[in-house]
Amino acid sequence: MKKKEKLKNQWQYHLMLLPGFLAVLIFCYIPMYGLIIAFENYNVGAGFASPWVGLANFKYLFNQPTFLRTITNTLFIAIWKLALGIVVPVTIALLLNEMKSSKITRFYQTLIYIPNFLSWVIMAGVLMDILATDGAVNSILASLGLAPINFLGSSKIFPWTMIWSDVWKGFGYGTIVYLAALTGMDPALYESADVDGASRWVKITKITLPLLMPTIILMLILSLGNVLNAGFDQIYNLYSPVVYETGDVIDTYVYRLGIQQAQYSVGTAVGLFKSVVSAILIAVSYVLADRLAGYRIF
Amino acid sequence: MKKTRYTAFDFFLVIFLGIICITCVLPFVHLLAVSFSSNAAVSAGKVGFIPVDFTLASYDYVLKGGKFLRAMGISILRVVLGTLLNLALMVLTAYPLSKDELRFRKVYVVFFVITMLFSGGMIPTYLLVSKLGLKNNILALILPGALPVYNMIILMNFIRGLPREIEEAAWIDGATPFQTLSMVIFPLLGPSLATVGLFSMVGHWNDWFSGLIYMSNPDMYPLQTYLQTLLVNFEQLLQSSGNGADIMAILSKMNARTGRAAQLFLGALPIMMVYPFLQKYFTKGLTLGSVKG
């Protein structure tokens, strides 16, 4: 009633939306339509309207042992990253919260947040230098009398190098999120625990951790959509054919097959498989985030 | 006030956390030290966290070559154009979508949100950009991500939180929607624009992958893509950087490790310089995005 007349000049709002609408239509929706080439035999002349081959590309893929191992590699690396990406920041946040000097806490926060903003190219350069067989880390190990570790060249160790270096790069962000959640807490809870003579350990496990739970659940749910993202930027810049057996993941496979070898249709078939699974996971995680943690982004 | 009492556990905490936090920066300090050290000192493994046999040879080599600076120029241009385009489209899209009475608002929102759930992925996007003739064009680095949908929604939620009376006053004075946006709403967006703007800047600066796939001419590489190629082939590049005598002169002072370290450090420098702002606004951004209730 009243609202209708309030919003005059409706067409001007639609005009404002036009540039963003077109940008998304062209660069998001046309590629979505382009996924159709997963069912075609793509050739450059015909473009997205190439000859139809049905599920042939998928059949070919699922007969490739090199493809199947990328799924297990991806899940292994991504799930460990997800788990440690929660455990480590929560632990550090709880410990930082226990510190009595807020100046030192703030200084520490400043340090741990830095790697988060640097690109994986820079980080890969740094890691290649310090993790080399003659690099800084191995010379420290040698001075401690330990055997050298081939962090990047051994297929047994490579996934763990990826997992821990990712945790190292990203834990600052998580820590800040959890600390932000902790600053909003009611000090009265701790005071009454003090009156009851509760120990520090009891206060952490019985008060702080339960209060953090909603945030932890939220972060966990929101990272669900990443179960098929093992981290292309990181792995592509650090892997090599020697570690493909355990280090080749879906995204690196798509890149090599689709872009480097120009097998567009097969590469897109992998991409489509991944997009569908991820979209379902993201949709489920948004619903869960709303139901369990009361968090909505729109 | 009670006097704080320190137990052994407190000292343990300070030291234990200190070690963990220091590991976040020590590798970079080491890299910096390597970049300022001589070939001989680095090859002998003498460099820890302080430059040994101090020399600027690596930086001299990097900055004289021209390729590094050209790549940096492309990156700077890309950050400026890309961020401005992102901000313009985010504001222009977020403002109308913040109005509940907008006709077809639900349709628009669904249209944008779907792109957060589902995407065409790497190859169809690559084929489209190629087909549009954007390869080796800086637009290929800017247009595909012209509207960051997630950040636009953060901005939309922020605008929804502004008191409506401000706009109503402008409407009564006869302001059109465009005038209301530019003169009333836009000036109020300060901190939230800074947040999403910084997200965009860091994203554009750090992106190396679009440069790799959309630029077939290495002269068009943005800095991070250029650095990425150095991770693989800086050794050869160094070997082929002049005639025999030149190379001998260069290699007497620096090597691939010191040269690469210098370039990585220079590539990280702009991020380090805006880091204080990043820290301030990224923490703010955490709370900006959520809707209450």
Image: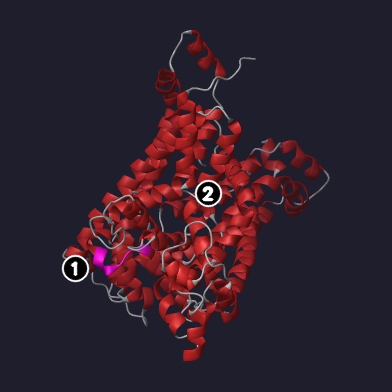
Question: On the image, numbered disc 1 is attached to which residue?
Answer: A60
Q: Quadrant of the N terminus of chain B?
A: top right
Q: Residue at x 65, y 55 (%)?
A: B92
Picture quadrant of residue A161: bottom left
Residue B240 at x, y percent in the picture: 45, 86
Q: Nearer the viewer, residue A148 or A298?
A: A148
Q: Which residues are magenta?
A: A238-243
Q: Is residue A75 visible?
A: yes
Predominant SS of the magenta segment: helix
Residue A4 at x, y percent in the picture: 67, 41
Disc 2 is placed on an element classified as: helix
Q: Amino acid at mark 1?
A: Tyr
Q: Nearer the viewer, residue B83 or A88?
A: A88
Question: On the image, numbered disc 2 is attached to which residue?
Answer: B109
Residue A230's disc is: none
Q: Establish whether labels 1 and 2 are both on one chain.
A: no
Q: Amino acid at mark 2?
A: Val
Q: Is residue A95 above or below residue A123?
A: above
For disc 2, the chain is B
Instruction: Find the residue positioned furthest to the top.
Output: A196
Measure the C-alpha gap from mark 1 to mark 2. Answer: 38 Å
For disc 1, the chain is A
Q: Is residue A261 left or right of residue A24?
A: left
Disc 1 is placed on an element classified as: helix
Q: Is residue A51 left or right of residue A187?
A: left
